[in-house]
Image (tube, helix red, strand yellow):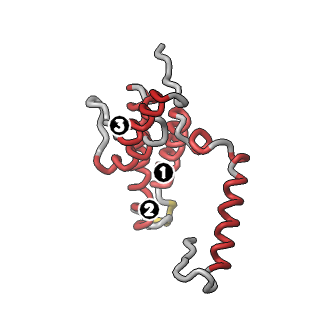
Amino acid sequence: MTRRQRVDTVKGAVTTMAGAVNEIEVPEHVLVPEAAMKFWRSITRARAADRWNDSDLEVAAELARTKASIERLNIDIAEEGDIITNDRGTPIVNPKHSLLETLTRRMVALSRMLQVHAEATQGKSREQVKGNRAQAEAAGAAEKAQNGLIPGLRVVS
């Protein structure tokens, strides 16, 4: 088993910087379609570059394909509607909802497996309260300041 590089050393800082600058390549034996590449990049950036092994990258590719399929299904459902008419003329729930539910469950499972879900990347939710509160207070202060005290300041909601 290979020891992981400590991040609080000079060598660790150099390794971390190299990982932040260089994109992780898709393994040659794995297919990631162009529609899934934006998901591949966001997934592989969620962990330090030196923390990925070949097996993890294979699972990351499956997660990227899953997310691309979810996006495609959401577009289809938005166009077709939640209720469609079957061949007999009976209104039914769009069957793509069932597939979307299955893919969403797969996405959650794969995210947990790879440790790229919110708790792994952002910390426990109870630790997010202070940051969320600070964000809300900053937005409130900016909104008050927008009343002409700071020209050009716009609050993004």
Residue that carries the numbered disc 3 in the rendered image: 24
> Residue type at mark 3?
Ile
In front: 79, or 112? 112
Proximity of marks 3 and 1: CB atoms separated by less than 8 Å? no
Q: Secondary structure at mark 3?
A: loop
- Give x and y (percent) for residue 31: 29, 37
Callout 1 touching callout 2 (CB < 8 Å):
yes
* Image vertical order of residue 112 relative to residue 80, above or below: above
Asked whether 33 or 93 is in front, the reply is: 33
Q: Which quadrant of the figure contains the C terminus? A: bottom right
- Say which label, 2 or 3, has the lower sequence index: 3
Q: Residue furthest left?
A: 28
Mark 1–mark 2 distance (CA, rounded to whole Å): 9 Å
Q: Give the amino acid at mark 1.
A: Leu
- Residue at x 29%, y 45% (from the top left corner): 33
Residue underneath mark 2: 77
Q: Which mark is residue 100?
A: 1
Quick one: label 1 or label 2, which is nearer the N terminus? 2
